[in-house]
Image (spheres, rainbow, N blue to C red):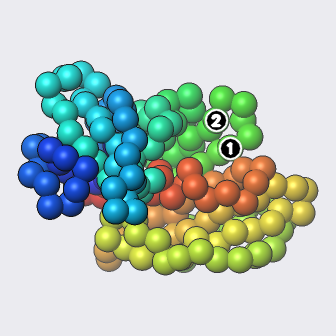
Amino acid sequence: MLATLGLRLHQAPAPASTVVTVIRPGAQLDATELRVVSGISWVHVHAHSAADIDGWAVNDPTLLTDIPMQQHDDAALGYSLLFPASWSYAAGGPAVAFFTSADGTQKLTVVTTDTVEHLPPVPTSPGKADHELGPLDVYGKSPVLTFYKLTAGGWELSLSFLWATGRAFGFDLREPQADSGLLKQILASVIIR
């Protein structure tokens, strides 16, 4: 579950149906059925650790993912996010975090600093800007995602924003394809404190 404010579970697959509970961000859900009602895709779920928590949620990739995720909570830098459970985490210094796929083909770098101007320049390897996507919602901010085609092959997807005076964030994903699906799901899970 990606939604940062919680996910409403409905009694039936309809927006006007009674809300039976709100599931916290990062909760694991077991899906039992998919159904399209009035053009809206719904998924029937129950909480992985509590089968009595049961209901229907809108099947939206910004709210739910079928990729097992784990949470990274950086209390010192005041943010958390979900990343694929098969990936590894490594600190790259006091304000840098690396999240790397098991095969090493995807690497997300998260950097925090005082201003956007102090973030590392992008792309981090020779390449050129190809196109942009957005704005995207990252915990209430609306940055634009830039796709860089790297000279040596592959892509770098990058966005940055000023959260508040003295706090800026940069998210940079290197991967073989220009696919922003996973990065958008990770960004949808970001919580900044």
* Residue 113 visible to an observer of this rendering: no
Q: Say left or right for 181 vs 151.
A: left
Q: How many marks?
A: 2
User: Residue flagged by tag 1: what amino acid is it?
Assistant: Gln
Determine the residue located farthest toward the front in the rendered image. Answer: 38
Residue 174, x across and y down, in percent: 70, 53
Residue 96, x across and y down, in percent: 52, 49
Residue 61, x across and y down, in percent: 45, 53
User: Residue flagged by tag 2: what amino acid is it?
Assistant: Ser
Residue at 34%, 62% in the rendered image: 38
Compared to residue 4, the image places residue 27 above or below, namely: above
Give the residue at mark 2: 101
Residue at 37%, 35% in the rendered image: 33
Compared to residue 88, the image places residue 109 above or below, namely: below
Residue 132, x across and y down, in percent: 64, 77
Foreground pick, 171 / 41: 41
* Residue 15 visible to an observer of this rendering: yes
Quadrant where the image shows the N terminus: top left
Give the residue at mark 1: 106
Q: Tell me, yes or no, whether the two marked residues, 1 and 2, touch with CB atoms within 8 Å.
A: yes
Question: Mark 1 or 2 closer to N-term?
Answer: 2
Foreground pick, 182 / 104: 182
Compared to residue 53, the image places residue 75 above or below, namely: below
Q: Secondary structure at mark 2?
A: loop
Residue at 21%, 60% in the rendered image: 15
Q: Secondary structure at mark 1?
A: loop
Quadrant where the image shows the C terminus: bottom left
**Crowding near pointer 2: few (<14 within 10 Å), some, many (20+)?**
some
Residue 16 got which mark? none
Residue at 45%, 43% in the rendered image: 65
Q: Say left or right for 63 vs 126.
A: left
Q: Say left or right for 13 vs 96.
A: left
